[in-house]
Image: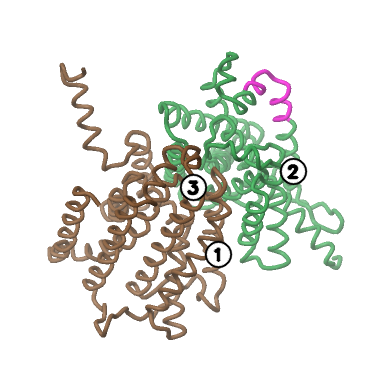
Chain colours: A green, B brown
Amino acid sequence: MEKFTLFNQVVQYILTGITVGSIYAIVAVGFNIIYNATEIINFAQGEFVMLGGLVMVSLVHGAHVPMPLAFVIAVAAVTVVGLLMERLAIFPLKDVSVIRLVIITLAVSILIKGLAMFVWGKDSFGLPAFSGNQPLFFLGAAVMPQTLWIIGVTVAVVVLLTLFFERTMLGKAMIACADNRDAASLVGIDVQRMVMLSFMLSAALGAVAGIIITPVSLMEYDRGALLALKGFGAAVLGGLGNFYGAIAAGIILGIIESLSAGLISSAYKDAIALGVLLVVLFVRPGGLLGSAEVIKLKKF
Amino acid sequence: MGRRNLIGLSALALFLLLFPLIGKVPGFSHYVAIMTVVGLTAMITMGLSLLMGYAGQISLGHAAFYGLGAYASGILTAKYGMNPWPALLTGVVLSAVLAVVIGSPSLKLRGHYLAMATLAFGEIVYIIFNSWGSLTSGPDGFGDIPRLSVFGFAFDTALRNYYLVWGVALLMLVFLLNLIHSRVGRALRSIHGSEAAAMAMGVNTAWYKIQVFIISAVMASIAGSLYAHYVRFINPPVFSLTFSIKLLMMVVIGGMTNVWGAILGAALITFLPEWLIFLQDFDILAYGLILLLIAMFLPKGLLSLPAVAREQVRRRSPGGAR
């Protein structure tokens, strides 16, 4: 066994940080997609992550569906949850304040959490890693294959979303909607449909995050709130609504958390990460990549 | 203050005065204790409704101010032997200072900043309650917090604490009702109507929002101190994010922009577990559903139910539509 130097340890912490941070990043992107289309902070975002993980657990352990197929079914199932949420709780309301819509997402998150407790109980569930548990070594740090999966999936998400938003008509329409709803609707974009799509896309992203993290950190019915908190933090840190900012901020948040857990105190790791978040919020209110001018125009 | 508020206040005071009689009915003896908790909770939700309804801001960290009051009182009296009243005041000052630190940067900006900042603040405070063992006794909490007393009169029974808590809560209610009808209240309403117009008229909108935030934090802190001296034992779970979210629910259910609604919401959500005991752990489903239905269909909260019902009847009845 090699001797662990401080350098090796720091590399190890940073790798762990990137892993966790990737999840925060995906959750943050989910927040942004809905925020851009509606200016709502969707408190149920963490619930999508939890559902993704638990549906996958049931498919793999309960129904013995092969992993790749289970992945597709689980993501599809949570996407339907996102669709139902928008159609049943958001769409029927006309002319409501953003603060009320935010409260509605909070209520939906409580409902989903309750239903999940009803279905899966209070136990934590795990999943087998996608490709074994044989660690690889990198700069003297042990890397689990699942870590590579998480990083790989995050990169894939970024690439696919970039292509979607920049190369497809639908993606461009969503961006137009985020930019200016009235103008978008004037040029014939169906704004209502874009809002519905934003919820579906967010739910799908949340499910992906939940599925890839479950083999590493298990999943239980009440995990959503904490994941949403970190994801929301990353979204604000990156400049709310800013896609690349969210990715960068998520990973930075993960690394800060992991480094402070390893080098300072594991009890205070969340406090330190949130403290940094607060300071950034106050010093650079637009977020790391956002602009303060844009913030003044936001409604919520 | 207005005649309707005065009548409401008298009715509420009379109801609260007579409420302990219900404790004499077999099977209802614990209702006075629950009602005391309602009073403590109402102190927080009243301030919060001012913040949400008039300043249009969400706080997800008021459980932390409640906790700061409780821990300041608990630690200073039980561990350092301080008199409860200066200890309570210390909690108030601490909460007010932190409210300025959190509130002034975030309330100068429009948007979701207070929600995020209070969320992070609440979590940090909660982690400190759990982890700073030498001061807070960590997750186990600590007891032996002394009773409150005034001029030798000790609040040493459940009933005396009930009257103390509701006495303070009613004073706060009177204060807020007066505040709403003062210069500050008018400024707040103008902000709610149109922030740009208010600013154009020379209203310092950020300063008014910060004032409301400080007031609500101080009220939560006082409630926390009273809680510590009433229950005489404190541990962290009471002051978690879950409670902050519940507080938010109470305000919405009662109706934002209505201090009376905040009291109703506090009472309903505090008594609900008692009535939904047959659901066991699944009461969370009922919470979610109730909150969802009220947020969707009764935007002004339960207090607007009679008005909404009248409106529906008027529309449905033949000839009443026009």
Q: Foreground residue, A216 or B80? A: B80
**Tag 2 secondary structure:** helix
Please give the residue where the numbered disc 2 appears in the rendered image. Answer: A151
Please give the residue where the numbered disc 3 appears in the rendered image. Answer: B205
Q: Position of residue A169 (x, y in %)?
A: 67, 18
- The kind of residue tagged 3 is Thr
- The kind of residue tagged 2 is Ile
Kindly report the secondary structure that dominates the magenta region of the rendered protein: helix
Please give the residue where the numbered disc 1 appears in the rendered image. Answer: B127
Do discs 1 and 3 share a chain?
A: yes
Left or right: residue B31 versus residue A14 is: left
How crowded is the residue under tag 2: few (<14 C-alpha within 10 Å), some, or many (20+)? some
Residue at figure coordinates x 62%, y 40% from the top left: A240
Q: Foreground residue, B38 or A5? A: B38
- What's the magenta region? A160-173
Q: Foreground residue, B221 or A23? A: B221
Left or right: residue B119 versus residue B317 is: right
